[in-house]
Image: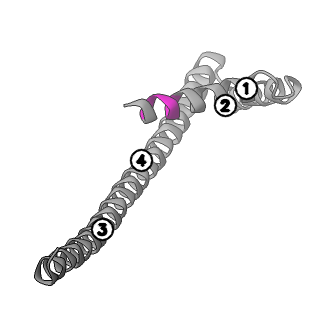
């Protein structure tokens, strides 16, 4: 081979190597930007879901409080003593609490764990 041909081949290889390095750098920058965008999206989804859950819990407890007050007044009207109505509702809540404590959380906790795992697994597959 002539010297010019060798120099041309060497310069072409250097140019190809430089292009590969440049493309690799661009690829890594794009990959980093894509990863950052995915992280921001997941963070936004998690934050929105957490806010939604907080709102649902607040409305649930407000509804529960209003329903129990209404039930207490209803029982009090039938018993002709609002005090007896409120004490009856308090006793109902006490029995529910005692039942949860006595069950030793063997029924409720595994059920909730299974629900959470299935919820996140289904979301991950979608």
Q: Which residue is mark 3?
A: 24
User: Which of the 4 image quarters holds residue 94?
Assistant: top right
At mark 1, the secondary structure is helix
> Could you tell whether 96 is left or right of 3 in the image?
right
Q: Position of residue 25 (x, y in %)?
A: 30, 73
In front: 62, or 40?
Answer: 40
How would you rate the neighbour count of disc 2 (Cα within 10 Å): few for under 14, some for 14-19, many for 20 or more? few
At mark 4, the secondary structure is helix
Cα–Cα span, label 3 and label 4: 37 Å
Q: Position of residue 77 (x, y in %)?
A: 58, 22
Mark 2 and mark 1 in contact? Answer it, CB < 8 Å.
yes
Is 121 situated above or below 5? Answer: above
Task: For marks 3 and 2, give the one nearer the viewer.
Answer: 3
Which sits earlier in the primary sequence, circle 3 or circle 2?
3
Mark 4 and mark 1 in contact? Answer it, CB < 8 Å.
no
Q: Which residue is mark 2?
A: 113
Q: Position of residue 65 (x, y in %)?
A: 55, 38
Which sits earlier in the primary sequence, circle 3 or circle 1?
3
User: Which of the 4 image quarters holds residue 7?
Assistant: bottom left
Cα–Cα span, label 2 and label 1: 5 Å
Is 4 situated above or below 94? Answer: below
In front: 67, or 40?
Answer: 40
Cα–Cα span, label 4 and label 1: 23 Å
Q: Which mark is residue 49?
A: 4
Q: Which mark is residue 60?
A: none
Q: Which residue is mark 1?
A: 110
């Amino acid at each position: 081979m002539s010297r010019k041909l060798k120099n041309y081949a060497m310069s072409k290889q250097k140019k190809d190597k430089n292009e590969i390095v440049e493309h690799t750098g661009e690829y890594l920058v794009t990959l980093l930007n894509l990863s950052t965008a995915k992280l921001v999206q997941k963070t936004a989804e998690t934050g929105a879901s957490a806010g939604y859950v907080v709102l649902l819990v607040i409305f649930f407890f407000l509804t529960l409080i209003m329903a129990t007050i209404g039930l207490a007044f209803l029982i009090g009207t039938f018993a002709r003593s609002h005090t007896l109505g409120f004490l009856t509702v308090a006793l109902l809540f006490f029995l529910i609490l005692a039942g949860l404590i006595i069950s030793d959380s063997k029924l409720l906790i595994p059920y909730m764990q299974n629900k959470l795992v299935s919820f996140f697994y289904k979301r991950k597959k979608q």
